Image: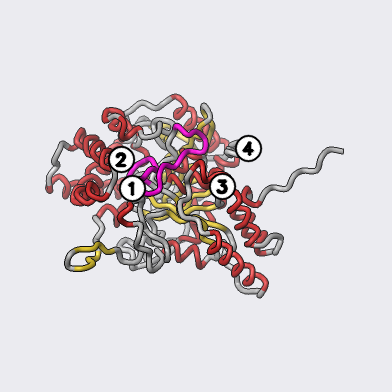
């Protein structure tokens, strides 16, 4: 007789499996949290993905979760399941440091709406995930918490700004993570670390948080965020499987009119009459794809075709090219007024990264685009939103690379300005989407030279379920990629 199969450690199990096991008392929430804490102790000292783990608090939450199960209480869909929260998101009792030492001493007095939604679902909040300073790089290093490594390859970025979230998922520290995305900050780290990332439609998940204040000689002053934060930034989930991402998205969906772009209700899902149409956009003509990137897109397209999707190749898409250009205008000009604060409070890395960011934007828009250009950019954005929604409707998806390159070498945005400018061209699939507020999902497709490669699926507004269906079709036909495999 052969040796009996070894039981799967709880930290390796999916969020969906863990929620069901806790609900049926197969395992306790305490056992799940203890397993995840053990995995954190084993892997986090090297990777530095989670930066504020409080075992006693997490275990106390888990005990309360088990008491609720024993009492026959109504349980939420993530009851007892560990989830990490990013260091730029308000979680009561924790500093919303954003990787900046000057912000490390002020604990949040309340939760952001997305954190409240996770708590109400029964999730156990376990650890704060690392990001770059001010959450504005495609890398995850800051002077306060240090460098986060990619679990697949120390020399490559884990992505940013939700690099800690993606890296911790990839090695099993938690089964789910919360992140946010204004320029690829959920989707790119997910791709770099071989997990699933969901950028929802603007307004689907509330971006509301407790008011933020800055200290002045006259006293605290409430901070106002620039237009792109309200119109382009979203909260969203990262997960190891599409099913878990779908579950987390449903939990985090929070119609909320306090959010400046919030909606009172989410439109019901549109059911198409037949197979979905998928248009493959490999390039917008500005940069050549690495061969491995092209192979990943080809593989993803083939898997969708096998699943019954109507797949067609498009030679470029000027609309996405224009959207990527607009991102570099609108985001950059919204950063310009806060540069003095960043230069004062940030470290050398973020100062250099932003200087190179402005240099990259200047290659497209010039050194000082001016108010008229900025206003016209917002006007053009509205037109592009309409045109893209008309193109996609309710039955068409776009399949694109995540980036024209595999995961970048660490600090590629600060070691050489020419190289930094190349990154901005390569990241067009990440920047074109948020400036228009559309949803997108990145899903792993292949391994190349020991690094995961993913594809991106874009859909019409509030068509997240259709995107996840397509991602599931790809995942079902893809060999599982796990760092511990």
Between 469 and 213, the one lying in front of the other is 213
Between 3 and 18, the one lying in front of the other is 3
Q: Which residue is mark 4?
A: 485
Q: Are marks 1 and 4 in contact (CB under 8 Å)?
A: no
- Marks 1 and 4 sit apart, C-alpha to C-alpha, by 32 Å
Q: Position of residue 471 (x, y in %)?
A: 52, 44
Q: Are marks 1 and 2 in contact (CB under 8 Å)?
A: yes
Q: Residue at 26% across / 50% down in the picture?
A: 345
- Marks 2 and 3 sit apart, C-alpha to C-alpha, by 33 Å
Q: Establish if 122 lies above or below 296.
A: below
Lower sequence index among marks 1 and 2: 1
Lower sequence index among marks 4 and 2: 2
Q: Which residue is mark 1?
A: 133
Give me the disc on residue 349: 2
Q: Are marks 4 and 3 in contact (CB under 8 Å)?
A: no
Lower sequence index among marks 4 and 3: 3
Determine crowd level at label 3: few under 14, some 14-19, many 20+ residues with C-alpha closer than 10 A: many
Q: Establish if 404 lies above or below 194.
A: above
Tag count: 4
Find the magenta span and give its range.
132-155
User: Which mark is nearer the camera, 2 or 3?
Assistant: 2
Give me the disc on residue 69: none
- Marks 4 and 2 sit apart, C-alpha to C-alpha, by 34 Å
Between 388 and 183, the one lying in front of the other is 183
Q: How is the image coloured?
A: secondary structure
């Amino acid at each position: 007789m052969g040796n009996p199969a070894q039981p799967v450690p709880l930290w390796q199990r999916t969020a969906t499996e863990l929620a069901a096991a806790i609900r049926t008392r197969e395992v306790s929430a305490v056992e799940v949290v203890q397993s995840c804490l053990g995995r954190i102790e084993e892997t986090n000292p090297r990777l530095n993905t989670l930066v504020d783990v409080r075992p006693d608090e997490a275990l106390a939450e888990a005990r309360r979760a088990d008491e609720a199960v024993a009492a026959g209480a109504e349980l939420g869909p993530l009851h007892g399941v560990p989830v990490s929260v990013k260091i730029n998101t308000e979680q009561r009792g924790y500093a919303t440091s954003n990787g900046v030492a000057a912000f490390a001493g002020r604990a949040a007095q309340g939760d952001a709406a997305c954190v409240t939604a996770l708590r109400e679902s029964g999730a156990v909040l376990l650890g704060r995930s690392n990001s770059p300073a001010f959450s504005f790089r495609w890398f995850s290093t800051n002077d306060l918490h240090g460098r986060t490594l990619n679990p697949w390859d120390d020399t490559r970025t884990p992505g940013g700004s939700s690099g800690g979230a993606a890296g911790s998922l990839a090695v099993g520290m938690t089964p789910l993570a919360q992140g946010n995305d204004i320029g690829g900050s959920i989707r790119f780290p997910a791709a770099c670390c071989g997990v699933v990332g969901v950028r929802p439609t603007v307004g689907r998940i509330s971006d509301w948080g407790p008011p933020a204040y800055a200290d002045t000689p006259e006293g605290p002053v409430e901070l106002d965020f620039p237009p792109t934060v309200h119109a382009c930034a979203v909260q969203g989930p990262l997960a190891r499987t599409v099913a878990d991402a779908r579950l987390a998205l449903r939990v985090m969906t929070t119609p909320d009119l306090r959010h400046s772009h919030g909606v009172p209700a989410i439109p019901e899902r549109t059911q198409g009459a037949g197979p979905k149409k998928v248009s493959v956009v490999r390039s917008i003509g500005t940069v050549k794809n690495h061969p491995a990137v092209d192979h990943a897109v080809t593989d993803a397209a083939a898997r969708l075709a096998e699943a019954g999707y109507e797949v067609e190749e498009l030679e470029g898409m000027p609309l996405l090219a224009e959207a990527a250009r607009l991102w570099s205008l609108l985001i950059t000009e919204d950063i310009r007024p806060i540069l003095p604060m960043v230069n004062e409070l940030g470290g050398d890395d973020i100062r250099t990264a932003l200087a190179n960011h402005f240099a990259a934007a200047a290659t497209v828009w010039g050194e000082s685009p001016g108010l008229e250009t900025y206003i016209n950019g917002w006007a053009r954005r509205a037109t592009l939103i309409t045109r893209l929604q008309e193109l996609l409707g309710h039955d068409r998806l776009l399949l694109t690379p995540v980036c024209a390159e595999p995961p970048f070498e660490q600090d590629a945005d600060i070691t050489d300005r020419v190289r930094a400018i190349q990154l901005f061209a390569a990241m067009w699939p990440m920047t074109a989407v948020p400036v228009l507020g559309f949803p997108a999902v990145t899903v792993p497709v292949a391994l190349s030279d020991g690094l995961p490669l993913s594809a991106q699926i874009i859909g019409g507004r509030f068509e997240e379920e259709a995107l996840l269906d397509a991602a599931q079709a790809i995942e079902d036909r893809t060999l599982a990629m796990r760092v511990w495999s």
